[in-house]
Structure formats: C-alpha cells, structure tokens
Amino acid sequence: MSTTPGPAVCSFAPICRSDARVLILGSMPGEASLAAGEYYAHPRNAFWPIMGALFGAAPEQPYPVRLERLLDAGIALWDVIGRCRRSGSLDSAIAADSIEPNDFVGLFTACPRLSHVFFNGSAAETAFRRHVHLPHGEHRIRVQRLPSTSPAHAALNFSDKLAAWQAVRNATLTAAHAA
C-alpha cells in the first residue's frame, strides 16, 4: 500500500441562493461525483433518494430539477473541503495536511439567512470543526451531524437514514416560519 498522497482534487462551487436557510455540507465529492460534475452522483449514495422522499428531488429527475427543488426549499449544498489530495473516493484517503477549506465567511455573507448546517457524516463535521473558523456572530447557526449517505457507510439502512435526515425537513419548515 502506497503512503504517497493522491492527486489534488477540488470541490464544486456552492449550490445556493441568497435566501437559503439550511446548508448541507459534505466533506469532498467522490470520484463518481467529480467525473459527473454533480453532487452525490454515485448511484448507491442515498442522498438523492432521501432528498426525493423529503423534498421531491428524486434521483430519476434531471440534476438541474433536483437542485431547483432543494433551492426552492431553502437548501444550499456545498462541501467543507475546497481542495485536498486524495487517492480514490474515501474520506479516510484524504491527506490531512493537504486540506484547504472552502470560504465559509463568504458563503455566510452571501446567504445571511442561514440558520442550520447539517453535516453529511462525521468526516464533514470533523473537517469543519478543525479547519473552518467563523466570525463570532456566525455561532448563532445550529449545527448537526447526520448519518453519512455514502455507500461506504452501510451501518444504517435506508429507512434509518431517512428518519434521521427528517431533521433537514423539520429545519426548513422551522426556518420558513421564522422568516
């Protein structure tokens, strides 16, 4: 097994509108997503089936339609890591000393209504807590880790993941009423 870090990979631009109230953060897109140019493109990733059940953004719909459904629900998508070196798709293969976080100060400035951040798995949460330093005023935002939708994390079945991810739906409803 080689210990040489893999090639540099870069995440996508955020999918957001200025009226977003909820942010879902992954760690870094996997190889299938990078190749497709789409968030959560691996066919066994549970993200789009969950978003289909919660917001009508089902995997069989064209990608732009799925994104529009999330945007209409007040949801933004992004990744914690903007650039890193990684061999393959697994978060465990990311060279820790290569992590460059995305610009969250810029994102929170562009989306001032964000009130909830959900991490898609523990790797996203860990990277955020280690590498992202927000201005003091941004600590008003509620953060919560959800079970990873990655096919590499099969400890929970789809029904259990869907039940946990209901928190995103609840947050969109709560944030909409508060607006």
Image (cartoon, rainbow, N blue to C red):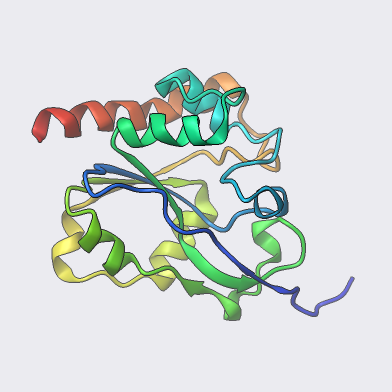
Number of numbered markers: 0
Pick the residue in front: 51 or 64. 64
Residue 65 lies left or right of residue 44; in this view the side is left
Pick the residue in front: 151 or 104. 104
State which quarter of the image contains the C terminus: top left
Q: Is residue 61 above or below residue 87?
A: above
**Name of the residue lying farthest toward the left:** 178
Q: Is residue 32 above or below residue 110?
A: above
Where is residue 93, by image quadrant? bottom right
State which quarter of the image contains the N terminus: bottom right
Pick the residue in front: 37 or 94. 37
Pick the residue in front: 179 or 26. 179
Where is residue 166, by image quadrant? top left
Q: Is residue 93 above or below residue 16?
A: below
Residue 95, horizontal then vertical, whole percent: 65, 74
Q: Is residue 29 above or below residue 66?
A: below
Residue 139, horizontal then vertical, whole percent: 19, 60
**Name of the residue lying farthest toward the right:** 1
Residue 38, horizontal then vertical, whole percent: 59, 46
Residue 6 lies left or right of residue 73; in this view the side is right
The residue at the point 40 percent across, 33 percent down is 68
Residue 3 lies left or right of residue 171; in this view the side is right
Residue 86, horizontal then vertical, whole percent: 70, 68
The residue at the point 49 percent across, 55 percent down is 124
The residue at the point 62 percent across, 22 percent down is 60
The residue at the point 16 percent across, 54 percent down is 140
